[in-house]
Image (tube, rainbow, N blue to C red):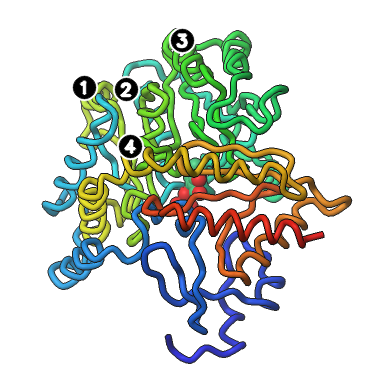
Amino acid sequence: MPDFGANDLDAFWMPFTPNRRFKAHPRLLASAKGMFYRTPEGREVLDGTAGLWCVNAGHDRPRIREAIQKQAAEMDFAPSFNMGHPLAFQFASRLAQITPKGLDRIFFTNSGSESVDTALKIALAYHRARGKGTKTRLIGRERGYHGVGFGGISVGGISTNRKTFGSLLTGVDHLPHTHGVPGNLFTKGQPEHGAHLADDLERIVALHDASNIAAVIVEPVAGSTGVLVPPKGYLERLRAICDRHDILLIFDEVISGFGRLAAPFAADRFGVTPDLMCLAKGLTNAAVPCGAVAASTAIYDAMLAGAEAPIELFHGYTYSAHPLACAAGLATLETYREDDLFARAAAIEGYWREAIHTLADARHVIDIRDLGIVAGIELAPRDGAPTARATEVFETCFDEGLLIRVTGDTIALSPPLILEKSHIDRMVETLRSVLGRVA
Ligand code: PLP
């Protein structure tokens, strides 16, 4: 790493970070391999979060690194507007082979936020193409996180966005979140209670009429707002109501895709197929930024059969299907296949679950949620200072060699899927010890 001085901290306006607090006590990562990061001083940090829920195959996979290097030497960039390079088509074909049946038309973006806004725009354009242009309302969910684009923060259910940026897009409604339903505390896997909350969609339909509603978007498992696992039957019920009223169902699988839930996608895990699926993160093992929307053949076909126009979907990014991202993505999908990583996640899920739930009696813990290789450990908020306790746990864990993520008062864990039992044990031991010491 080049020489790094204290002044170098100033210019970078860090995203989603209390900049002053961080810059007073910076935490830097200099290299990464497998399950571990290393700090500039050479201290090892176990990656309990797969970076940011994205390095599903572990760090520095040679196949992925070499594919990126090779592509960089061959062709740095090629436009995808009215032009193409073979890797883009190959990557889309290969991805369409593993997405749920019928979701086999792929639109490339560069991030989860762009995938969400793309999916929302496809939903609106699709209804217009079918002559149903009044279907414009979008429905999200309280406590939903769908990235940071205007569409995403509007359908998302995080009040800080409204406090910071105002009232956002109009024509948006929100379903209730599924958190805190009585009887669900400390559930292992999917909770029993709360499927009825999907019925709120019928209330919104009754209020606005289905002729005005374009799409519903949900994270099958909400990650960034505290690991909220859908109650049994909830997603099935949403699907049925959407079908009844010709409303598109969008799954934001930016976190839940690519083995995170011990299945290729949440759609597979829950047996519910959406009409559009938002992808990013694990799509390239995070080695190069990339996102995608997987659309149903029916949507694609309807768009192409719509009113004749030179461009069927007036949308795209300079870096859609960037050659480096396609190279990284193809190598990532091959790595998942070769290592059988999704099955591996399924094989270790039981051990993960039982180990995480041993923290039920750890100090401050008021709930634990899990599914696949994800866990949320909710802490009692400190009096008068919500999130302060979780923040302290995060900072102490980092000092003691474990990277976790906290969201509100919940510790979120989502390690790379290559993890071994010994890594799980180490995470649980560190957490128990830190929780025992934090006030
Ligand atoms: N959607 C979900 C469900 C996410 O968890 C995230 C990021 O964590 C996003 C969208 C946004 O992705 P990005 O940060 O790549 O824009």
Labels 2, 4: front one: 4
Labels 3, 2: front one: 3
Residue under the point 21% across and 62% down: 63
- Tag 3 secondary structure: loop
| Tag 1–tag 2 contact (CB < 8 Å) | yes
Tell me: residue 164, above or below residue 64: above
Q: CA distance from mark 3 to mark 1?
A: 22 Å
Labels 3, 1: front one: 3
Specify which label sits upstream in the sequence, 1 or 2: 2
- Amino acid on which disc 1 is placed: Ala
In screen coordinates, is 344 left or right of 387?
left
Specify which label sits upstream in the sequence, 3 or 1: 3
* Viewer-closest of 17 and 338: 338
- Amino acid on which disc 3 is placed: His
Q: CA distance from mark 2 to mark 4?
A: 31 Å
Q: CA distance from mark 1 to mark 2?
A: 8 Å
Please name the residue that numbered disc 3 is placed on: 245
Please name the residue that numbered disc 1 is placed on: 305
> In this orientation, does residue 130 appear?
yes
Which residue extends farthest right?
Answer: 384
Q: Residues within 10 Å of mark 4 (few under 14, many from 20)?
A: many
* Viewer-closest of 181 and 348: 348
Q: CA distance from mark 4 to mark 1?
A: 31 Å
